[in-house]
Image: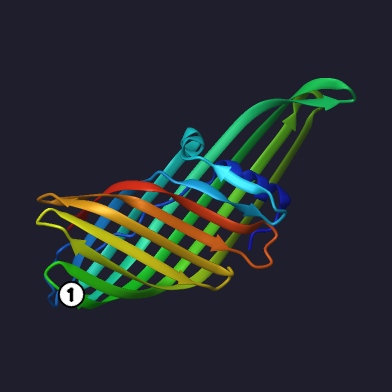
């Protein structure tokens, strides 16, 4: 679980995430494994409340301004009615600024550098329970892993003061849910996904809906995703939610 006071303040300025789960394309159900993947950009902002009751509100623009590296993708394998998939997000964000501190009534320069590395990994297995020419529906089960590692470096050169802090934490939850598709015509289709469950957090859930266009080799995907955690007896957060529009491509290989 997340533990330190500085971490709850740091996260409000440097976290962002992820990628929506890929959905199976119109693959022919057979007895061989068919592999696919997806790469996404999620224009997510962050909201929620800290354990002390402070609001968290960080825009996507604030996140992008301080982004060092990010990976957002999905890998999946489908065989008959079964699909195995893993949704993976990695984020490395850092920010530095110079401010003024008052030392014995005198203004002095203070340097503050913060950094955050975060993983969100969601492995799952889905089983198709309904399929027609225009619709399909699957139930799924799996887990969700959230990890964050934060660092703070505070220095006042005028008095040779420098302090470093670090903290990390993780939560693991089981999930159950459903996902499906609705074909509009030969090129356009809608996909949706919902899941909910609990574990080390009090509850976690997500919902997404997307509009997709099928090209000859790849599909273009656009939609909106909402992901939330509610924490029980956590030192840092009461709630954390990440939401926003996404865009990406899906492919088979």
Residue 75, image x, y percentages: 29, 61
x, y percentage for residue 138?
28, 74
Whether residue 143 appears in this view of the structure is yes
The residue pinned by badge 1 equals: 131
Residue 173's spot in the image, x, y percent?
51, 70
139 displayed left or right of 106: left
The picture quadrant where one finds residue 31 is: bottom left
Q: Quadrant of residue 12?
A: top right
Q: Relative to 94, is 1 above or below?
A: below
Relative to 96, 235 lies left or right: right
Report the residue at 52% width, 41% height from top: 93
Q: Position of residue 207 (x, y in %)?
A: 40, 61
Q: Nearer the viewer, residue 165 or 87?
A: 87
Q: Residue at x 9, y 50 (%)?
A: 216
Q: Residue furthest right?
A: 104
Q: Quadrant of the N terminus?
A: bottom right
């Amino acid at each position: 679980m997340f533990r330190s006071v500085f971490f709850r303040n740091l996260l409000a300025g440097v976290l962002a995430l992820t990628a929506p789960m890929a959905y199976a394309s119109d693959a022919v159900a057979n007895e061989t494994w068919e592999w696919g993947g997806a790469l996404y950009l999620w224009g997510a902002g962050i909201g929620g409340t800290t354990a002390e009751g402070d609001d968290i509100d960080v825009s996507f623009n604030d996140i992008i301004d301080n982004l060092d590296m990010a990976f957002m993708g999905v890998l999946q394998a489908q065989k008959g009615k079964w699909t195995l998939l893993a949704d993976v997000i990695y984020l490395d964000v850092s920010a530095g600024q110079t401010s003024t501190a008052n030392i014995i009534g005198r203004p002095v320069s203070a340097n503050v550098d913060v950094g955050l590395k975060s993983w969100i990994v969601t492995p799952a297995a889905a089983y198709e329970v309904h399929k027609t020419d225009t619709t399909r529906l699957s139930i799924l089960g799996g887990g969700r892993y959230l990890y964050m590692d934060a660092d703070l470096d505070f220095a006042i050169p005028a008095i040779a003061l420098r302090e470093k802090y670090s903290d990390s934490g993780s939560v693991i939850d089981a999930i159950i849910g459903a996902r499906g598709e609705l074909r509009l015509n030969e090129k356009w289709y809608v996909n949706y996904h919902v899941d909910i469950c609990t574990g080390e957090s009090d509850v976690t859930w997500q919902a997404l809906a997307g509009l997709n266009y099928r090209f000859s080799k790849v599909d273009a995907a656009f939609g909106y995703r909402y992901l939330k955690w509610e924490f029980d007896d956590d030192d840092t957060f009461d709630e954390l939610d990440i939401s926003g529009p996404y865009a990406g491509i899906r492919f088979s290989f």
